[in-house]
Amino acid sequence: MKFTRRQIIVSGAGLAAGAGLNPLLAQAPLKLTTIPSSGQQVPAIGIGCRNYRGSLNSDDMGVFTDTFATFHRLGGTVIDTSPNYGNSEEIIGHIMAELGIRNQLWVATKVDREDRASGITRMERSFELLGGDNFELMQVHNLRGTAIQLETMAAWKEQGRFRYIGVTTSSEQQYQAMIDVMSRQTLDFIQVDYSLGNRSAAERLLPMALEKGIAVLVNLPFGRGRLFNAVGDRPLPDWAADIEATSWAQVFLKYIMSHPTGAIPIPGTTKPHHAEDNMAAARGRLPDANLRREMENFIDPLLG
Ligand SMILES: NC(=O)c1ccc[n+]([C@@H]2O[C@H](COP(=O)([O-])OP(=O)(O)OC[C@H]3O[C@@H](n4cnc5c(N)ncnc54)[C@H](OP(=O)(O)O)[C@@H]3O)[C@@H](O)[C@H]2O)c1
């Protein structure tokens, strides 16, 4: 199914009206994070595109496009993808062109090859698929071929082909390797797994990022489904009102955003109503250090 741009905008507007979001909160400013290496400010939340896969002619494309239109309408710009996620880059490139929003977005992708030549081929293909004049962040995916890929990436950054370079992981087993790379290389970004239920990165990586002025993207902010499964159908605790959170997703995202690094969660979603829910986390109050501890004490027994 192919949606026209008007159909997408109309359905997005209907969603906002139907969602019953607190109108006062909807007018609160979107939180921004400052990237230490440049001073550029970006929205404090993004979107992860790991599950944008499939045929360009499938019915899913309409829902994917609607999700992106919703994210963009609510002020979202930071998107994260990878050539490693099936044909996500192709789909995202197509959606951005269809909506005419490519140059308004802050695009991050990755390179996942061991050797120099195939890394170059892979990155050139990302440029083709994602298009646009501005390309913000290239990351070494899961530290694959780190040293060799960073050489090419640093040279291309110098040439202005992208603005920032970084490395990613989503496994504690790679944290020592992350520490080594962060010590030896000049990085603008790291991307790590960090959530209310998975806090090792806050002990081992985030203090170093803060000290060295490296910006942080956060993958697996919900631990995929783990945090939602842990809370089940429990009502929100009273303290959720103190941070103006109206859903569990907002609680989990606000926890990440309140880390002193200004960590930017990139929740993966392919659903317009989830994009709307997640973007609401970037408005209103964030937890202070005391409430962050209370949130940790709340979740730990539920995770067992
Ligand atoms: N090593 C790496 O570099 C690495 C590894 C993993 C992930 N990543 C990046 O990080 C992104 C996020 O990770 P992830 O997608 O694997 O995991 P995640 O963000 O922790 O969880 C995604 C899951 O949460 C659901 N969800 C999203 N918003 C929701 C909401 N408001 N309420 C209820 N459920 C919600 C999604 O379902 P719906 O689609 O139905 O909304 C999806 O099943 C990825 O897309 C990717 O860009 C990078």
Image (cartoon, rainbow, N blue to C red):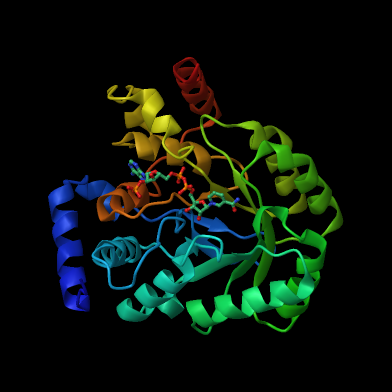
Q: What residue is drawn where x is 39% and y is 56%?
A: 30
Report the side of 264 relative to 144 (left or right).
Answer: left
**Picture quarter with the N terminus:** bottom left
Above/below status of 147 relative to 156: above
Counting from the top left corner in percent of width and height, residue 64 is at 31, 63
Counting from the top left corner in percent of width and height, residue 56 is at 33, 72
Counting from the top left corner in percent of width and height, residue 219 is at 54, 47
Counting from the top left corner in percent of width and height, residue 176 is at 79, 40
Report the side of 42 relative to 7 (left or right).
Answer: right
Q: What residue is drawn where x is 48% and y is 52%?
A: 266
Report whether residue 162 is seen. no
Q: What residue is drawn where x is 79% and y is 52%?
A: 182
Q: Nearer the viewer, residue 195 or 240?
A: 195
Report whether residue 81 is seen. yes
Q: What residue is drawn where x is 28% and y is 47%?
A: 25
Above/below status of 65 relative to 222: below
Q: Nearer the viewer, residue 143 or 57?
A: 57
Above/below status of 35 relative to 10: above
